[in-house]
Image: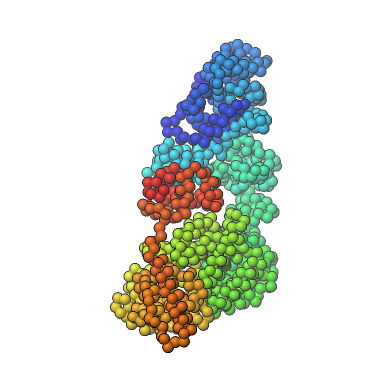
């Protein structure tokens, strides 16, 4: 028998000039040279670059291993003829320098193929004796085309009898029926899978911008890499489309929209994958494409077929774009682009079947208690009544876990007519409006909730359709809690108390969540009224109710507010203790951390900033920023830019502070806690500090502020801002300050009456500044003495004083200087006490002056960057400039790997780089390292 050799089957594809270097893959493939190693299996779906990776590896093999040589056979369907295959193997042997007479070797066929294989093995062994140290690789590419049992048996024979000098490498789209388990157990198998072949972000960047000649920034590359999941063919197909786009908006729009609906992706996967599948497999793929995740019983329920578990195992073995989600191989998903193609094909071929498939999925998930998935499928099927009932059933757990993003999505997914039929969902819709800052919308939905309850009382059929759970039972009290929130947002303290008290009285003793929420608003109302001691007592009791309800997220969120109350009470150390204790609880169980974890770091940043430790404050803010990226929606989001602005003020960067306060104002949502420090007034304080007194005066006039006003706690911050404006005006035009002193005296009496020591510190500081501005230094010193003597924690206030600038420095220098001798007519004991008080104030003033005269804190390294790295980012970059791996760096910093990645991403953005090596190089160039 004579079979012609097709020479082109024996050559590896030529290496492209712009090939992406993939060191990690080379190292994996080189492992095939290990002694006793028989097989390297490169198994992945179509388009994962198997052939390219192997041809690049073979092309450079001699450079790394001078005694190595490689043979190549590109298989096709014709190689299911064993004679043809062996003919090409003999030719491949010749390429390896192993001469074998083909006609002699093949003569025993077809009766005794093992004799031919034995001749091939013996020829390799003889060649090895003649060239000691020589190692040979034989690559069989596209092995998935082999279906002949006879050929599989021949390959198995080779694997079992290969001499140590020959190593077989197989590239395939599906695992072949070879003794892989046996080879694996013996340590004779190297496996390179789809996960190994996927491009990393760095490889994707080099492929797209160098090999494909594009000019994409890091964000574009990351977006494409995420959408394609590193699938090389997907990236290449996207690049082909991008080449035709001339403008940046076109590029951005394309990347955002790039899915399996792209015509190149559809054509590729339809031709290379779907068209090659048997009808049963194709039917299964299309019908289960509506699922985000797959498991056997679910697939059976949705597809109407049986044997789903076995089918998924077969699909994975065949590398049909199926990704296992667990080590037990119970759950899978389709590659995202493949799922897009399947869904597109399903809509084209059987559009009427799609809603039915989603309803089947909904029923299966609901029966398993997987409500979120059930709701999603019900919504896609537009079965809104079913979706609404499922949402009602899930509300208790969703609220307890504070899955705010999910609640918002649900509230926006149902028609308004469906929401209004349910009192529970009407409350959710109202909360969604409150999160958007629409107080009138909140009130309207609360009215709808009351109307639904009334209708249910009159129409039993309507009420019977609602989920009968605690959410429904406590709905009347919950509506009152939200009305308390609405009243608070409108500054109606009496209304807040009335509604909160009614909700509290309506709740049963075991309704801890309602009682905690209502009690919380009673505490907030006391705070808004300025009675801080009552506020702390009431709010602390509310926290205990939340704890009893098992609502850890709400308990931690409320801790942030309680800490603010302790600051208002003049005890920042109590606030710090609360934050630190809560952080221990929040992080005790590892990631993902509760959403309040970010806010706790922001709270500590504010406390650190006040005592003058801006470096620590910035570290907390950086950590908070990273955690906030992973957290759900929070009514406290405005706090981060607000505290960051305060840090910028400490550094004298008023322009950045103003921008940050504008950001904070855009994020602020009323109704969650009283607005005791209006952001607008903070901006006005910046106007005063920078000399823009006209803008500050316009604000004061618009607010109707006057020195004749009676004290009111919700306006205290504004009145203290007015005081700063009047002092600044006095310095320019010697305006009369007697009215200001009278206002401050009334505010002092009001704060002292309820023991609001935090307010007293600031009020007495401004009284001292006012007297000093009038030239009455003795009176100014007297207020400082009183401030220092009655403040619970005078050492906790630094920036409050130093942020007042030059006038405060003059006052402190005067206070730190020598004083007049005490009146000798005083009793010796009284005179000694006065001298002691005076000395304490002088020492305190000197310590504040020393803090101000110290150089302004800056990052540890000089930086010449448009946006400097934070201290924490500098620490991360320093560790990137080392041999440590990512997980080792995370351990060194005591953070999770996800947190480290977020830090690294921000560093790359600031340094305008895309790789670790480039970041280190840029760090040296800019003096950061």
Colour basis: rainbow
Pick whichever, 37 or 704, lies toward us: 37
x, y percent for residue 217:
42, 46
Image quarter hosting the N terminus: top right
Quadrant position of residue 371: bottom right
Q: Which residue shows up at 47% across the image and 41% down it?
A: 202
Q: Which residue shows up at 59% across the image and 57% down it?
A: 587
Q: Which residue shows up at 63% across the image and 48% down it?
A: 357
How many marks do you count on the picture? Answer: 0
Pick whichever, 403 or 740, lies toward us: 740
Confirm whether residue 756 shows in the render.
yes
x, y percent for residue 657:
40, 63
Farthest residue in the top direction? 104
x, y percent for residue 745:
43, 83
In this image, 257 relative to 722: left or right? right
Whether 439 is drawn above or below 325: the answer is below
Farthest residue in the left direction? 733
Confirm whether residue 9 shows in the render.
no
Whether 668 is drawn above or below 752: the answer is above
Quadrant position of residue 91: top right
Q: Which residue shows up at 31% across the image and 76% down it?
A: 731
x, y percent for residue 261:
51, 44
In this image, 550 relative to 221: left or right? right
């Amino acid at each position: 028998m004579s079979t012609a050799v097709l020479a082109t089957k024996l050559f590896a594809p030529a290496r492209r000039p712009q090939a992406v270097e993939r060191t990690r893959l080379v190292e994996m493939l080189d492992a095939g040279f290990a002694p006793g190693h028989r097989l390297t299996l490169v198994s992945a779906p179509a388009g994962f670059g198997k052939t390219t990776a192997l041809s690049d590896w073979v092309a450079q093999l001699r450079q790394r291993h001078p005694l190595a040589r490689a043979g190549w056979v590109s298989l096709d369907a014709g190689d299911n003829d064993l004679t043809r295959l062996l003919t090409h193997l003999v030719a491949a042997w010749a390429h390896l320098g192993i001469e074998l007479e083909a006609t002699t070797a093949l003569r025993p066929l077809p009766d005794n193929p093992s004799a031919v294989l034995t001749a091939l093995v013996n020829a390799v062994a003889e060649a090895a004796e003649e060239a000691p140290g020589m190692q040979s690789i034989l690559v069989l590419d596209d092995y998935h085309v082999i279906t002949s049992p006879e050929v599989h048996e021949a390959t198995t024979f080779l694997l079992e009898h290969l001499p140590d000098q020959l190593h077989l490498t197989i590239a395939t789209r599906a695992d072949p029926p070879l003794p892989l388990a046996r080879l694996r157990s013996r340590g004779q198998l190297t496996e390179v899978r789809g996960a190994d072949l996927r491009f990393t972000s760095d490889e994707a960047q080099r492929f797209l911008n160098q090999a494909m000649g594009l000019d994409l920034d890091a964000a574009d590359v990351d977006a494409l890499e995420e959408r394609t999941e590193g699938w090389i063919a997907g990236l290449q197909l996207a690049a082909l489309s991008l080449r035709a786009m001339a403008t940046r908006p076109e590029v951005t729009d394309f990347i955002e929209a790039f899915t399996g609906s792209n015509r190149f992706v559809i054509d590729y996967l339809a031709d290379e994958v779907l068209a090659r599948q048997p009808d049963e497999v194709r039917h299964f793929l299309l019908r289960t494409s509506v699922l985000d995740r797959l498991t056997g019983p679910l697939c059976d329920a949705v597809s109407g077929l049986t044997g789903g578990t076995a089918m998924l195992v077969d699909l994975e073995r065949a590398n049909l774009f199926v990704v296992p989600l667990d080590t037990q191989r119970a759950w899978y998903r389709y590659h995202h682009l493949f799922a897009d193609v399947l869904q597109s094909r399903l809509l084209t071929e059987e559009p009427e079947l799609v809603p039915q498939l989603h309803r089947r999925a909904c029923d299966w998930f609901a029966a398993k208690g997987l409500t979120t998935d059930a709701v999603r499928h019900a919504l896609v099927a537009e079965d809104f009544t079913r979706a609404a009932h499922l949402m009602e059933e899930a509300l208790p757990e969703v609220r307890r876990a504070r899955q705010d993003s999910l609640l918002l999505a649900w509230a926006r997914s149902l028609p308004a007519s469906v929401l209004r039929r349910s009192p529970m969902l009407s409350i959710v819709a109202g909360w969604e409006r409150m999160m958007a800052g629409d107080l009138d919308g909140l009130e309207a939905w609360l009215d709808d909730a009351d109307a639904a309850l009334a209708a249910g009382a009159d129409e039993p059929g309507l009420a019977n359709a609602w989920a009968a759970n605690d959410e429904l039972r406590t709905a009347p009290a919950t509506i009152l809690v939200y009305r308390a929130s609405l009243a608070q947002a409108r500054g109606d303290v009496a209304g807040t108390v009335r509604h909160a008290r009614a909700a509290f009285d309506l709740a049963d003793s075991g309704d801890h969540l309602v009682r905690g929420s209502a009690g919380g608003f009673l505490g907030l109302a006391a705070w808004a009224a300025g009675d801080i001691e009552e506020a702390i007592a009431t709010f602390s009791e509310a926290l205990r109710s939340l704890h009893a309800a098992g609502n850890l997220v709400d308990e931690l969120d409320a801790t942030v507010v309680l800490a603010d109350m302790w600051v208002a009470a003049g005890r920042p150390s109590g606030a710090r203790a609360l934050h630190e204790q809560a952080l221990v609880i929040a992080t005790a169980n590892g990631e993902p951390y509760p959403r309040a974890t970010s806010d706790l770091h922001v709270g500590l940043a504010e406390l650190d900033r006040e005592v003058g430790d801006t470096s620590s404050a910035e570290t907390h803010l950086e950590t908070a920023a990273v955690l906030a990226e992973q957290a759900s929606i929070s009514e406290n989001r405005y706090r981060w830019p607000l505290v960051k602005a305060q840090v910028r003020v400490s550094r004298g960067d008023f322009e950045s502070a103003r921008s940050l306060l504008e950001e904070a104002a855009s994020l602020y949502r009323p109704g969650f806690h009283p607005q005791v420090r209006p952001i607008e007034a903070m901006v006005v304080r910046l106007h005063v500090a920078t000399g823009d007194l006209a803008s500050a005066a316009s604000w004061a006039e618009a607010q109707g502020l006057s020195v004749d006003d009676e004290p009111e706690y919700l306006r205290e911050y504004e009145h203290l801002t007015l005081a700063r404006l009047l002092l600044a005006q006095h310095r320019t035009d010697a305006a009369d300050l007697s009215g200001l002193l009278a206002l401050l005296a009334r505010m002092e009496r009001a704060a002292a009456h309820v023991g609001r020591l935090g307010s007293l510190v600031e009020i007495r500081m401004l009284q001292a500044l006012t007297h000093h501005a009038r030239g009455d230094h003795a009176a100014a010193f007297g207020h400082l003495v009183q401030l220092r003597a009655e403040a619970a924690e005078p050492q906790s206030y630094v920036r409050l004083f130093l942020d007042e600038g030059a006038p405060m420095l003059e006052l402190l220098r005067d206070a730190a200087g020598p004083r007049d001798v005490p009146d000798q007519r005083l009793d010796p004991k009284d005179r000694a006490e006065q001298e002691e008080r005076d000395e304490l104030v002088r020492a305190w003033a000197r310590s504040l002056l020393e803090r101000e005269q110290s150089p302004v804190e800056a990052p540890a390294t000089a930086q010449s960057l448009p946006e400097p790295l934070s201290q924490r980012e500098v620490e991360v970059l320093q560790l990137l400039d080392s041999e440590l791996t990512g997980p080792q760096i995370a351990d060194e910093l005591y953070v999770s790997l996800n947190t480290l990645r977020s830090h690294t991403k921000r560093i790359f953005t600031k340094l305008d780089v895309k790789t670790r090596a480039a970041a280190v190089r840029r760090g040296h160039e800019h003096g950061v390292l």
